[in-house]
Amino acid sequence: MRVAVYGAGGVGGYFGGRLAQAGEEVVFIARGEHLQAMRSYGLRVDSILGDFVQPVQATDDPAQAGPVDAVLVAVKAWQVPEAAQAMRPLVGPDTFIVPLQNGVEAPAQLAAALGAEHVLGGLCRIVSLIAAPGHIRHVGLTPSVAFGELSWAETRFSALRKILVSDPGRVERLRHAFARAQGLTVEIPADIQAAMWEKFLFIASLGGVGAVTRAPAGVLCSLPETRQLLEQAMQEVLSVARARGIALPDDVVARTMAYVDRLAPATTASMQRDIVEGRPSELAAQNGAVARLGEEVGVATPAHSFIYSSLLPAELRARGELQFP
């Protein structure tokens, strides 16, 4: 397959690098020093599952890459609308697009710009980062990727969208490509929307409570007060999901809490790290989205509303929209 990876950070660099290592034709859309290093020296990936250096195709101009079979969108959630416009040259009649960032709104944003028939649901799990230009470091979790066709029952796009899909085997072809790659697992969930919301329940709650408290997962789980706040945040996501027709299982909060209990005690979410380090974060696409999507269906979300409001000044400062010491 010819695959474009839009965003070559910790997520895109790792998964795209593994596909290239497996022999797929991969082109990275990157920029700046990171792009130059990839062009000059290849993509270096240091991983707890095995290090490698892979020569890669890379450009900052999607028009140079031209239409591809699939686009993996690996930018931050708040960058998706702008990325959707910029990636138009990558999208031909049969191209399909898989968003891998946190949150649940990227598919609709991509569909609005590029057409619902091109967009799948997707998610990934990995702890990775850019260690230096051209250098990705995978430091935690067994990397996994999941994707599948969407019904669009949750959006303004018609469920008849499936009629527009000209290539019903596209999901399976991408699964085969990932299955040939080392250092990851791949899954096609029976309900990709439920799978995305289940991850959303985990990441928005852990990232939000972690960012407000400035504490890692081990501390959040060990203190009764923060553990209760974390569980409340997860329950709110569950309530919003069900009100929006998403079929999350009854035990999702208990299972997710058990998963958090098994994480390394020092684990933090990417949004928490961005906020602590003064960078723009996915606050609006995570805790802000829970509050906004809940309000649309009449579900109260006091924990996420508090988290969003508490972190908003720091977020606006990071974006240069507010100044204070």
Image (spheres, rainbow, N blue to C red):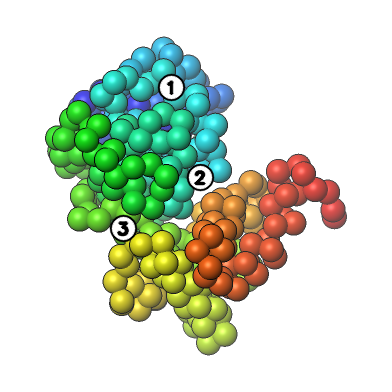
CB under 8 Å between callouts 1 and 3?
no
Residue 193 visible here: yes
Between 49 and 143, the one nearer to me in the picture:
143
Q: Please rate how many residues cluster around mark 3, counting C-alpha atoms within 10 Å: few if below 14, some from 14 to 19, many from 20.
A: many
* Residue 239 located left or right of residue 207: left
Between 96 and 32, the one nearer to me in the picture:
96
Residue 148 rendering spot, x and y as whole percentages: 25, 46
Residue 17 rendering spot, x and y as whole percentages: 32, 34
Q: Quadrant of residue 108?
A: top left
CB under 8 Å between callouts 2 and 3?
no
Looking at the image, is mark 2 or mark 3 earlier in the sequence? Answer: 2
Residue shown at 50% from the left, 24% from the top:
86
CB under 8 Å between callouts 1 and 2?
no
Q: Which mark is residue 241?
A: none
Residues at marks 1 and 3, CA–CA distance in whole angstroms: 27 Å
Type of amino acid under label 1? Arg
Label 2 sits on residue: 77
Label 1 sits on residue: 88
Label 3 sits on residue: 195
Disc 2 is placed on an element classified as helix
Residues at marks 1 and 2, CA–CA distance in whole angstroms: 18 Å
